[in-house]
Image: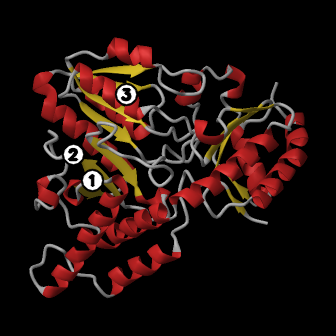
Amino acid sequence: MEVYFDNSATTKVSPSVQELVVKVMTEDFGNPSSMHLVGVEAEKYIKTAQENIAKTLKVDPKEIYFTSGGTESNNMAIIGSARANQRSGKRILTTAVEHSSVGATMKYLEEEGFEVIYLPVDSFGVVKMEALQEAMTEETILVSIIHVNNEVGAIQPIEEIGTYIKKVNPKVVFHVDAIQSYGKMEIRPKNCKIDLLSVSGHKIHGPKGSGFIYIKKNTKINPIIFGGGQQMGLRSGTENVPGIAGIGQAAKDCYDHLEENVQHITEVKDYMIDALNTLEGVTVNSRKGEAGAPHIVSASFSGVRSEVLLHALEDKGVYISAGSACSSNKPAISSTLKAMGVEKELLDSTVRFSFCEWNTKEEVDYAVEQLQQLLPMLRKYVRR
């Protein structure tokens, strides 16, 4: 049996997306900047994708800009808005549990002279609101918060955060990294006071190399890529029309079936958590039901290094992650787990299981059966 439980790293492209991408690549392959009919046909795919995505967020299609993926969207949002608003101040707030595409970007801005405050989280990975309230000032120009943590599935209270920070400073820019939440839950930027929102296509059964950023009208943001002035000058470069068509279709598919998909994925997640809790020496770092993201389970296995467990399960046809696959192919000690206060001896013994609507409880049974067989053997060889 082969079981793919690494959907937070990437998802399989859906049949409807695959069909559309191939059509755009082989039939409607024009450059959308070309003025002839072939170019005009290509441009229609971009407009359709904007409309599909805008409907899922209840925003204006003109507020959707396409990128190469989540990392570029996060970089564009953070660097672009920080530089555009630095005359008003250089203070930025973020959390200690951000994805590396945010964390590394913040380090870059610190080198440029910006002051970055990393807000602490509780034992569940949720930002401490009192720390946010204490750190938020009128000089704060940007607040960047991950919606769903990519390692443990913690959900941040973005509506509460957005409402509070805008009350303190209506001009502050609020950026939300929604790469692990988009397609898994309803997101309403206007209700949450969000100015910038990042999404990646390959997390929702779309193609790799596709992403988008929602930019609220009149938000001050500078481009970080220059050239031919495509996408209103905010993101130059010939548009990746097959990728854009693909992410637009994937977004539509996700939200056309959101309720039933989320219910199924949550059931699989909770089933996995219950099963893991029956195993000796296992600590689950994710929460059941709606308290956590529907698709992520982080678990620590005492006495077994995460990389060893990953490859042992791989030999049995079960594919998981030993951390964020977006950072590198070599697992590192998680800053998220550290910030949550996970015991030191478990930091290098933690793996992630992540699900999509195509996973089943039968697959969970198989994976847990393999764990029951592997763990006693692996613990015999633990380094002392």
On the question of residue 259 being in view, the answer is yes
Quarter-wise, where is residue 39 in the image?
bottom left
1 or 2: tag closer to the N-terminus: 1
Q: Residues within 10 Å of mark 2 (few under 14, many from 20)?
A: many
Q: Where does residue 70 sit, x and y in percent of width and height?
A: 38, 50
Mark positioned earlier in the residue sequence (2 or 3): 3
Residue under the point 55% across and 48% down: 329
Residues 320 and 188: in front is 188
Q: Are marks 1 and 2 in contact (CB under 8 Å)?
A: yes
Residue 207 visible at all? no
**Residue 216 image label:** 2
Residue drawn at (42%, 15%) of the image: 131
* Amino acid under disc 3: Ile
Place residue 110 in its image quadrant. top left
Going 58% across and 23% down the picture, which residue do you hit? 340
Question: In the rendered image, which residue does mark 1 sit on?
Answer: 59
Dot placed on the residue nearer the N-terminal end, 3 or 1: 1
Query: Quadrant of the image for the N terminus?
Result: bottom right
Residue type, label 1: Val
What percent of the width, then of the height, locates residue 249? 40, 70
Q: Quadrant of residue 318?
A: bottom right
Q: Is residue 91 left or right of residue 157?
A: left
Label for residue 161? Answer: 3
In the rendered image, the quadrant that contains the C terminus is: top right
Query: Which SS class for mark 2?
Result: loop
**Few, some or many C-alpha atoms within 10 Å of disc 3 (few <14, some 14-19, many ≥20)?**
many
